[in-house]
Amino acid sequence: MDELMRRRVYGADHDDPDPGPRPGRVYVELVAGPLDGLLLDVTGWPGERLASGAALGTELGKFGAGGSAVYGPVEGDPKRWAWEADSP
């Protein structure tokens, strides 16, 4: 758990002195792709949304500023989402 608590949360401000996860929140780990290693806060997301994944805005993907990285759940591991593609 200590390792998880030191991780950076997707969307945290780069100037935030504590960009890590917050107690009482639910996170999935983003695996591979441009956001590899970040945590995504999925607290309160309905099951359908959790099952479908998300397109997350990032400047780090193939399409640069304004692009997205698409992540979806890893079968058999609900705490991890794998990179699927970059999107404009």
Image: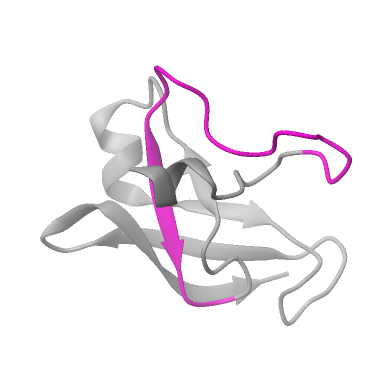
Considering the whole magenta stretch, tell me its main secondary structure: loop
Closer-to-camera residue (73/87):
73
Q: Position of residue 86 (x, y in %)?
A: 61, 75
Residue ID at (74%, 61%): 58
Q: Number of labelled discs?
A: 0
Query: In the picture, residue 59 is in which quadrant?
Result: bottom right
Write the residue at 84% across / 73% down: 64
Query: Could you say where residue 69 lies in the image, as x and y percent from the top left?
Result: 60, 66
Front in this rendered view, residue 14 or 18: 18
Q: Is residue 14 magenta?
A: yes
Residue 53 left/right relative to 39:
left
Across and down, in percent, residue 67 comes to 76, 65
Residue occupying the far bottom of the picture: 62
Q: Is residue 6 magenta?
A: no
- Where does residue 7 sit, x and y in percent of width and height? 54, 50
What's the magenta region? 13-33
Taking the view exactly as shown, the residue that stands out farthest to the front is 2
Question: Image height check: is 70 above or below 34?
Answer: above
Rendered-image quadrant of the N terminus: top left
